[in-house]
Image (cartoon, rainbow, N blue to C red):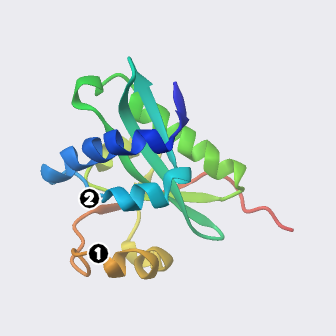
Amino acid sequence: MVRRAKIIDVPEMVKLINYYAQKGLMLGRPMIELYDSIRDFVVVERDGKIVACGSLAVIWSDIAEIRTVAVHPDYTGLGIGKQIVKTLIEDARELELPKVFCLTYQPEFFKKLGFVDVDKKELPHKVWKDCINCAKFPDCDEIALILDIAPLKSA
């Protein structure tokens, strides 16, 4: 079952995320960044251990990013990553955001959930908010994908 992350979860989340980062499969995240964005994260816990995590970061008034989705290798293939992403999409809907996107090295996973390719140039707020500070900027090798989730509501 997916639940909101707690402060106590951060050390295990960092280990999980950085396990994949060391393999070049996702970007690493320092512990301070996870503490700073803890309210953005959800986790899945099994047998007292954090086995998956992911976050939703609002980028602008009409878009949020699904980021840092990681599932412990012993728990892949069980639909846990899909549960995490669906929960984050629902969070975006509750915020009345019409779109979510991701930057990933695992595009096929997200395409199975309805995401489609998008040019990074179509995500200028992301570039100026986060990417500009990344060590891989401007030569990012992640794949950008986007999902329309709801029509933009008028005030």
Q: Where does residue 30 sit, x and y in percent of width and height?
A: 30, 59
Q: Quadrant for residue 8, please give it.
A: top left
The answer, for residue 68, to whether it is visible in the render is yes
Q: Residues within 10 Å of mark 2 (few under 14, many from 20)?
A: some
If you read the primary sequence from the N terminus, does the residue marked by circle 1 or circle 2 appear first?
Answer: 2
Mark 2, secondary structure of its residue:
loop
Q: Label 2, on which residue?
A: 27
- Image side of residue 22 versus residue 46, left or right: left
Q: Label 1, on which residue?
A: 134
Whether the residues at callouts 1 and 2 have beta carbons within 8 Å, the answer is yes
Q: Quadrant for residue 50, please give it.
A: top left
Q: In the rendered view, tell whether residue 49 sits above or below residue 64.
A: above
Frontmost residue, 104 versus 130: 130
Q: In the rendered view, tell whether residue 146 sits above or below residue 20.
A: below
Q: Residue furthest left?
A: 23
Residue appearing at x 67%, y 49% in the figure: 93
The answer, for residue 103, to whether it is visible in the render is no
Q: Quadrant of the C terminus?
A: bottom right
Q: CA distance from mark 1 to mark 2?
A: 10 Å
Mark 1, secondary structure of its residue:
loop
The amino acid at mark 1 is Cys
- Image side of residue 31 versus residue 149, left or right: left
Report the number of discs. 2
Q: In the rendered view, tell whether residue 79 sits above or below residue 17.
A: above
Residue appearing at x 50%, y 78% in the figure: 125
Frontmost residue, 61 versus 17: 17
Q: Where does residue 51 sit, x and y in percent of width and height?
A: 35, 30
Q: Residue furthest top?
A: 47
Q: Residue furthest front?
A: 8
